Image (spheres, rainbow, N blue to C red):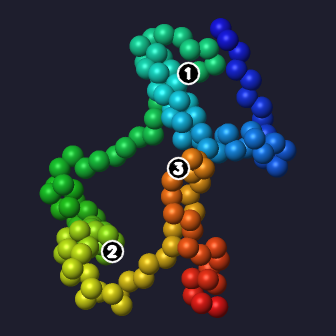
Amino acid sequence: MSTITIPVVDDYGTLDAETLGYLAANAKDIAKYLEGARAYATKQLEDGKEVPGCKLKPGPKRREWVDEKTAIDAIRNAGLNDPYEHVLLSVPKVEKKIGEGAMDALRGAYYEKPGRPVLISATVATPPPIAKHAADDFGF
C-alpha cells in the first residue's frame, strides 16, 4: 500500500502561493477523485469487503406517507386543516413557465443581485470582471 501524506492545515496562510494555487485550481478534480474513492469504498463495504479505517452506518430515516389521500384525511381529523405548503415560485421557474418575453411585465417585481465570485483556473478564458466593488455597480 502506498502512503499518501495529507498535511493538516489550520491556517491556510501558511501554504506557499504555488501550493495554494495548485489546490485551488484543481479543487474540483481533487474533490471528484475523493468522491470516487468514497463511492468505491462504500461499494466495497456493501459487498462485504474490508476497507481499513472505514465502516458503514445506517443512513438517516426517511418518513413518507403510505397513501396521500388517507394521510390528508387523518391530518385534517387531527386538527390541521391545511396540510400543504404554499410557496411562491422562484423567478427562474416563473420565467420558464411564462417565457422570457413575458418577464418584461414583471421587471419591477423582482431584482437581480450579483452572484458570489467563483474561483476558476487561470487557464480558463473568461472576460475580465466588469466591477471590482459594489460601489462601482451602483455608481457611488
CA distance for labels 3 and 2: 30 Å
Q: How far is disc 1 from disc 2 in space, using C-alphas?
A: 43 Å
Report the disc number at residue 124: 3
Can residue 81 be seen in the rendering of this structure? no
- Considering only vertical position in the picture, is 51 above or below 129? above
Of the numbered discs 1 and 2, the one sitting upstream in the chain is 1
Looking at the image, which residue is at 53% across and 30% down? 33
* Relative to 17, residue 92 above or below: below
Q: Could you say which quadrant of the image residue 102 lies in?
A: bottom left
Q: Position of residue 81 (x, y in %)?
A: 25, 73
How packed mark 2 is, by other alpha carbons closer than 10 Å (few <14, some 14-19, many 20 or more), is: some
Query: How would you rate the neighbour count of disc 1 (Cα within 10 Å): few for under 14, some for 14-19, many for 20 or more?
Result: few
Q: Viewer-nearest of labels 3 and 2?
A: 3
Please tell me whether mark 2 sits on a helix, a strand or a loop. helix
Q: Quadrant of residue 82?
A: bottom left
Residue 114 lies, in percent from the top left, at 51, 73
Q: Position of residue 4 (x, y in %)?
A: 70, 20
Front-most of 132 and 110? 132
> What quarter of the picture does the C terminus occupy?
bottom right
Q: Earlier in the sequence, mark 3 or mark 1?
A: 1
Q: Residue furthest right?
A: 14
Instruction: Give residue 91's mark.
Output: 2
Side of 67 where 55 appears, left or right: right
The disc, 3 or 2, on the residue closer to the chain's N-terminal end is: 2
Q: Quadrant of the N terminus?
A: top right
**Which amino acid type is shown beneath numbered disc 3?**
Val
Q: Which mark is residue 55?
A: 1
Q: Residue at x 45, y 11 (%)?
A: 48
Of residue 90 and residue 32, the one placed in the foreground of this image is 32
The residue at 58%/34% (across/down) is 30
> On the picture, is 95 further left or further right than 126?
left
The kind of secondary structure element at disc 3 is loop
